[in-house]
Image (cartoon, grey):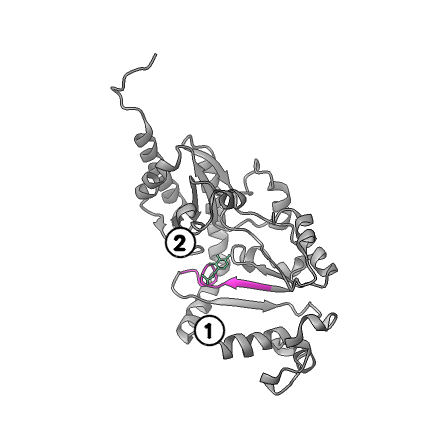
Amino acid sequence: MDPLDPEAWRAALRDTTRGVFLESIGNPVLTVPDLRAIADIAHAADVPVVVDNTMATPVLLRPFEHGADIVVHSATKYLGGHGTAIAGVIVDGGTFDFTARPARWPRLTAPYPRFDGIVFTDAFDGREGRTPFLVLARAKSVHDLGPTLSPTSASQILLGIETLDLRIRRQTETALDLARFLAQQFEVARVHHPGLPGHPEHEQVSRLLPEGLGSVFSFDLAGGPGVVETFIDALELFALVANIGDVRSLVVHPATTTHSRLDAVGRADAGIDLTTIRLSVGVEDPDDLRADLAQALQAVARATAAPADAPVLR
Ligand SMILES: *Cc1c(COP(=O)(O)O)cnc(C)c1O
């Protein structure tokens, strides 16, 4: 459903719904749903709210303060920060009462034969981080299914988290600066960054995320799909990589990579176009990054300019 329309979430709830799942900041055009309104709708139906907070990170948004019950992160992105390890994080706020509608959650509320017949909601009270849901996630998903983080990867993620706050603040500021720059360029049709005052969701987003929206944002090139390759090939500092949240600046063309499985309707629903370019802004010198974008846009301008000796049509 349209993540920006709380009534669409209400209409989508079924008796079989076991969770509401949303991204606090949607990728790649920075869709920011009204987390509190959606949480209220889900809780009225006794459904927990799971928020993917990868794009915001805990530096910019703590979803538990806005009604989330469980928060997940791809630690591969900003938490690690260096694109060196694949990892994920589940944080359980311990706020959702699985015993209110026990028939919905038999693995948590009924004796579980695989684990000596214990009832997770009776056996674990959340002390020392042992909530029923997290114990089940560790026992079932990690132990039985095996997606266990290697010690090396764990240490890389921990090392990254030590500089998270510094990186996010610098990258967020540079990204907004570059978004402002791009919005003034003739070769750019549109910039998808709600931090810009002209953006339709600017006011509402600024209330939820007063410290900014992170360093990933997108924009549409004005020259049509044919100039996408010229632009990306001309970039020297932005690497063509599908990752985000890295200390290095990255660029990707969503329509042919991350969103390539969508048809035209799906792309339109996701707010992206064949000319949409996604940036993940790193920690490099902001002037260097702006200059790199400027020279790549000049390459686009040169490629699309009519040759000087072209016949003048009357
Ligand atoms: C990358 C990403 C994921 C998937 O995480 P991996 O670490 O690549 O498995 C999930 N959610 C968001 C918002 C992401 O950017």
Q: Is residue 179 above or below residue 162?
A: above
Q: Nearer the viewer, residue 32 or 284?
A: 32
Query: Where does label 2 land, which residue?
Result: 242
- Amino acid carrying label 1: it is Pro
Secondary structure state at the residue bearing disc 1: loop
Residue range of the region highlighted in magenta in the rendering: 71-82
Mark 2 is surrounded, within 10 Å at the Cα level, by few (under 14), some (14 to 19) or many (20 or more) other residues, namely some
Q: Is residue 239 left or right of residue 141?
A: left
* Residue in the image at 50% along x and 53% along y: 169
The numbered disc on residue 169 is: none
Above or below, 105 against 249 in this view is below
Residue lying farthest to the bottom in this orientation: 116
Is 49 covered by the magenta stretch?
no
Where is mark 1, residue-wise? 147
Residue 123 at x, y percent in the picture:
67, 82
From the image, give the main secondary structure of the stretch colored magenta. loop
**Kind of residue at badge 2:** Ala
Please state the horizontal and vertical placement of residue 303, each as a whole percent of the image: 30, 32
